[in-house]
Amino acid sequence: MIFRHDVFETSAIARRSFEHRARFDDGLGFHRKFSEDYTRPIERQARALRSIKSDVLACSQSAKKRVPESIYQREIEVATKLARVAGSILLTHYYSPFLVEQKVNALDELEEVTAADREANELIVGRLREEFPDDGILAEESADTERRLSKDRVWLIDPMDGTKNFIARDGDFAVQIGLAVRGESVAGVVYQPVRDVLYRAVRGGGAWIEAAGEPATQMLVSTRTEPGEMVLASSRSHRSPRMERVVEAFRFKDELRRGSVGVKIGLIAEQRADLYLHLSPSTKQWDTCAPEIILAEAGGRSTDLFGQPLRYNGIRIDNRNGIVATNGAAHEMVIEKLKPLLKEFGRVPA
């Protein structure tokens, strides 16, 4: 089923972001070469991508000064640049009429998808395969194969986390690129193109935010542990009766309702929220890989609803036991307070 969105109006925040995008230049002409190429056919885009391979790999001297070196330095630099360029691809579609299609995902569920999802996915996957040919890849808009299961290093990619928000034109979507090594998240980038906000982290290197061209600033979570003092980052669209029951039981101080999983977890890293709960098994590993390391490096913690660690590159790609992401200090309290509620819901570890 296909239907068309012929929407030309954009919000004020979207227009401001377009100005940010126009100003963005990493000194290598990286953004300019891509943005000039968006009106060309996909085949010519591919040629343009190949022509700037050296730009993607070039090391940003300013980034070196801002973020501590890591054994994953090259990986995070490549992922950061790819996220920004993929974000510009998304914005180009965002400001134009576009088609919305229905796809059947890997779990036989119907989901909405756009050409923007696919084009950003093609960019990221294609470049990562060139730069890290021995790594596995699990990407939302690419066919999954068992080859990745034999790999120690696997990239988990959501080219647009928050497609519904993209379609609704509320700005709440993000590019997410994460790297897992032996099942654990070790590096990740989450980029919100409309707001021009980028989160990134590598294991042992801290969590960093770059907002609208400003220098990178290290993020640290809050230390709040009393529910009545805590802010919940919650979903715009997934409010179930069970989630209403949880909110009622905890009596949080406030809520911030946002779209993308990466954006919600990023709010915790920024101290704008203190926790995020996702009760259903509907999220996938590419939804959490990049955000998890960002939150961990900011001092927070992510597990499933039962307090077990999230793992990556399994045969099943869903987070079947839900998600609990917190500032770390409140994590055990949240897990304990959830136990009677999960029992009430009939939830047991899958």
Image: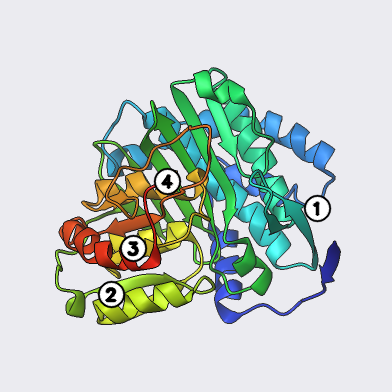
Residue kind at label 1, given as amino acid type = Thr
Q: Quadrant of residue 198?
A: bottom left
> The residue tagged with tag 4: helix, strand or loop?
loop
Q: Earlier in the sequence, mark 1 or mark 4?
A: 1
Residue 246 image offset from top left, x and y in percent: 33, 74
Measured in 3D between alpha carbons, the distance from the residue under mark 3 to the one under mark 2, in whole angstroms, is 21 Å
Mark nearer the viewer, 3 or 1: 3
Residue beneath disc 1: 39
Report, in whole angstroms, how far the alpha carbon at label 4 lies from the one at label 3: 13 Å
Tell me the residue that label 3 is attached to. 342
Residue 350's disc is 4
Total numbered circles? 4
Q: Position of residue 337 (x, y in %)?
A: 22, 66
Residue 130 at least partly seen: no
Residues at marks 4 and 3 touching, judged by CB atoms closer than 8 Å: no
Please give the name of the residue rendered at 21% of the width and 57% of the height, measured from the top-left corner. Answer: 331
The answer to whether residue 153 is above or below residue 24 is above
Q: CA distance from mark 4 to mark 2?
A: 29 Å
Res. 347 image quadrant:
bottom left
Q: Give the labeled residue for mark 2.
A: 231
Residue 98, position in %: x, y? Answer: 79, 64
Up-down relation of residue 267 to residue 82 (above or below): below
The amino acid marked with disc number 2 is Val
